[in-house]
Amino acid sequence: MSQLSLVFFTVLAQSAVGLFISLGLVQLLARPNEKAMTRAFMAVLVMLGLGAISSVTHLGQPFRMFNVMFGLEHFSALSLEIVGLSLFGGAAGAYVGMRMFNILPKLQNLVLLGGMAAGILFILLIAQVYTLKTVPTWNSGWTSFQFLMTAFVVGPIAAIALLRAQAKELGDHVVKLSTNGLAVTNMIALAISMTGYVGYLFWLGQVSVFGNPFEHLGYGQLLGMLRTGLMMFAVMALSISTLRGGKSPVCGIVSLVAVLAAEIAGRMFFYDIYMSASAGM
């Protein structure tokens, strides 16, 4: 696995988008405690920052990212990805700063909505980097689908974990209302993700390349089963606990770790099935 830094970048960045959107919906619909929610939104920046650091390490030398920026002149996919990162990171950072210092309260929701839209755009720009005609196993809409589903599966779980950890400040009513809604959303996202994953694996087996991807990746089935098992455990355990009135932050943290591990396993599979049309694996 030579692309581990990119595995962490894509998973953490997309998870940060999902967390921002999940917290944004809670903020817009439930009107929770301001200080507690500000701390929760700061977790988005931490997660995104860790992902960005991972991407810089992949370049070998941090200053090489400026060379990538020069590609904007030609609208290169990698350069546009950095623009997307800047837009989402800037919007999320601006929103957190506005909350912390109570700047322009009436415009905060507008910035929040803009950040949510920028997050979706950012994920699509990441997917565009990998949608290459020279890599048949990546060149499909399944790439965008998987990246988006990472956000919609991890985001609600991370939000539930953060809300549970601050239940005393937020209040039982707000936490119950918010986490129940997030749990239902998460189960729907799980159903869509798992159904799509089956379709993706079927499509992958039909790709016309040098050889069958599964034949070249001996541990591919193990990664697939690990991803599926961990994801179902994380989503179902936390969702059932939440809908039954559970408030344990430990359950939320364990579920978050499990779902992140699931996505990392799935992304390792994604990178390891890299296969050019001419050279095989």
Image: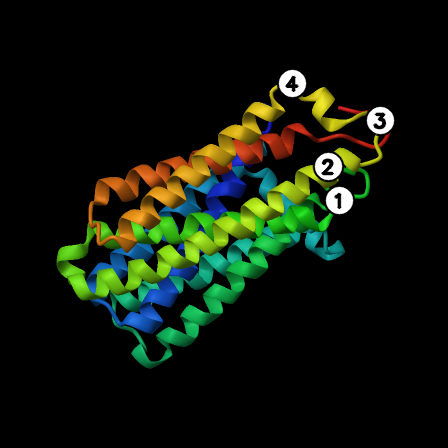
For label 4, the residue is 218
Circles 4 and 1 in contact, beta carbons < 8 Å: no
Q: Above or below — where is 76 with respect to 207?
A: below
In this rendering, does residue 17 appear at all?
no
Q: For the residue carrying disc 4, how many other residues have a C-alpha within 10 Å: few (<14), some (14-19), or many (20+)?
A: few
Please name which of the two marks, 4 or 1, marks the residue nearer to the observer.
4
Q: Above or below — where is 205 with respect to 158?
A: above
Q: For the residue carrying disc 1, how many other residues have a C-alpha within 10 Å: few (<14), some (14-19), or many (20+)?
A: some
Q: Marks 2 and 1, Cα distance to the nearest angstrom?
A: 11 Å
Q: Marks 4 and 2, Cα distance to the nearest angstrom?
A: 15 Å
For label 3, the residue is 210
Circles 2 and 1 in contact, beta carbons < 8 Å: no
User: Where, by quadrant of the figure, is residue 214 drawn?
Assistant: top right
Tell which circle, 4 or 3, labels the residue nearer the N-terminal end. Answer: 3
Q: Which mark is residue 204?
A: 2
Which residue appears at 51% of the width and 59% of the height? 119
Q: What residue type is labelled 4?
A: Gly
Q: Marks 3 and 2, Cα distance to the nearest angstrom?
A: 13 Å
Tell which circle, 1 or 3, labels the residue nearer the N-terminal end. Answer: 1
Q: Quadrant of the N terminus?
A: top right
Please name which of the two marks, 3 or 2, marks the residue nearer to the observer.
2
